[in-house]
Image (spheres, helix red, strand yellow):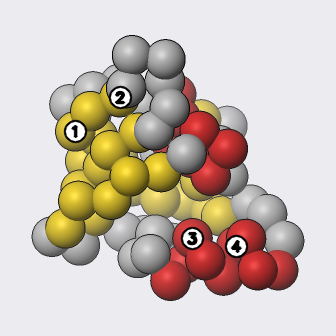
């Protein structure tokens, strides 16, 4: 299982599954990260937090903890 946190800068990946419970999972889905969507990793901050991605045509910054909940292929 590979997560969005493990993706390298420049990678384009597809979301396979979202982990997490309740409100946390709902918040990630509300940001546009849903099953099957294409995500491009744009930048990773020097200490790894946050991760900037492009999803559905807009830029999104995610904390490491949130990026770990997104399973990719």
Q: Secondary structure at mark 2?
A: strand
Mark 1 crowdedness (10 Å alpha carbons): few <14, some 14-19, many ≥20? some
Residue 24 place in picture, x, y as percent: 73, 71
The residue where tag 2 is placed is 44
For the residue pair 54 and 18, the one nearer the viewer reads as: 54
For the residue pair 57 and 1, the one nearer the viewer reads as: 57
Q: Along the horizontal axis of the image, is 17 left or right of 8?
A: right
Q: Residue furthest right?
A: 21
Going from N to C along the chain, the mark reached first, 2 or 4, is: 4
Q: Secondary structure at mark 3?
A: helix
Q: Along the horizontal axis of the image, is 43 left or right of 30?
A: left
Q: Visible in this render: residue 36? A: yes
Q: Are marks 4 and 1 in contact (CB under 8 Å)?
A: no
Residue 7 place in picture, x, y as percent: 43, 31
The residue where tag 1 is placed is 42
What is the C-alpha distance between the residues marked 3 and 2? Answer: 18 Å
What is the C-alpha distance between the residues marked 1 and 2? Answer: 7 Å
Q: What label does residue 25 carry, if any?
A: 4
Quarter holding residue 18: bottom right
Quarter holding residue 1: top right
Q: What label does residue 28 carry, if any?
A: 3
Q: Residue furthest left?
A: 57
Q: Are marks 3 and 4 in contact (CB under 8 Å)?
A: yes
Q: Residue at x 47, y 51 (%)?
A: 62
């Amino acid at each position: 299982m590979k997560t969005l946190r493990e993706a390298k800068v420049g990678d384009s990946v597809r979301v396979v599954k979202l982990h997490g419970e309740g409100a946390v999972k709902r918040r990630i889905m509300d940001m546009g990260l849903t099953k099957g969507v294409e995500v491009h990793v744009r930048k990773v901050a020097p200490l790894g937090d946050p991760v900037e991605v492009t999803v559905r045509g807009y830029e999104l910054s995610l904390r490491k903890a949130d990026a770990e909940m997104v399973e990719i292929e």
